[in-house]
Image (cartoon, rainbow, N blue to C red):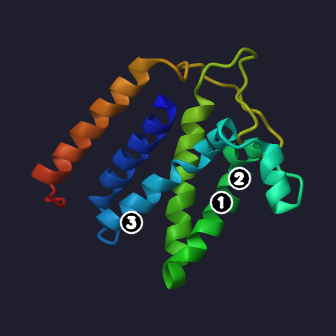
Amino acid sequence: MADLLSHVLVAYAAFTVASWQADWLTDEWIAVGTGGAAIPDLIKVEIVVGSGTIETVLGVPFDVSAVGTLGGVLLVAGAIALLFGERRYRAYCLLVAGGCSALVLDGMRKYADGRAGDWLYPVPWNPPSPNLYVSSDSTVLGVVLFVALVVGTLNRRVFGGSE
């Protein structure tokens, strides 16, 4: 689960830094965007509930791995954004931005063939991966945690974020 935590911390740091310039990006909206970073990791629900079970409940063919793609992020973010009423457009944009930040991080992982996975689906292109890290590498989590702590501290002490 270090992968999920890394995605959420990167999104938190990015949205917090962006909030220093955008007055509308309050702590509540930062939380929405940060939650969007967890959308691609909903693929891990298959550990508990298989695709067959979800197919039975929905009554249509379903593959959980599709959630971890750009198309999946757009679709799930749209479904979640409907819960925000009149602020659904802002929520949708932040959820998609958070989800895309997680997909970009996933695209930098090491892959055996040197190409990133199908995370850009429905775009039919697997870009080359820079092969920067293995998702189980604890160093990545340590670096991301350090950056998030620095950003959080700066937000509270220098930029007057919520306490």
Helix, strand or loop status at disc 2: helix
What label sits on residue 29 in the rendered view? 3
Q: Residue at x 18, y 61 (%)?
A: 162
Q: Along the line of sight, which residue is nearer the eye, 24 or 57?
A: 57
- Label annotation for residue 5: none
Direction bottom: furthest residue = 86
Q: Earlier in the sequence, mark 1 or mark 3?
A: 3
Sequence-wise, the earlier of marks 2 and 3 is 3
Q: Would you place residue 54 above or below residue 112 in this image?
A: below
Q: Residue at x 75, y 41 (%)?
A: 50
Q: Is residue 19 above or below residue 132?
A: below
Q: Is residue 60 above or below residue 47?
A: below
Residue 64 horizontal/vertical position (percent):
74, 45
Q: Is residue 150 left or right of residue 112?
A: left
The numbered mark at residue 76 is 1
- Are the two marked residues, 1 and 3, in contact with CB atoms closer than 8 angstroms? no
Q: To which residue does mark 2 refer? A: 72
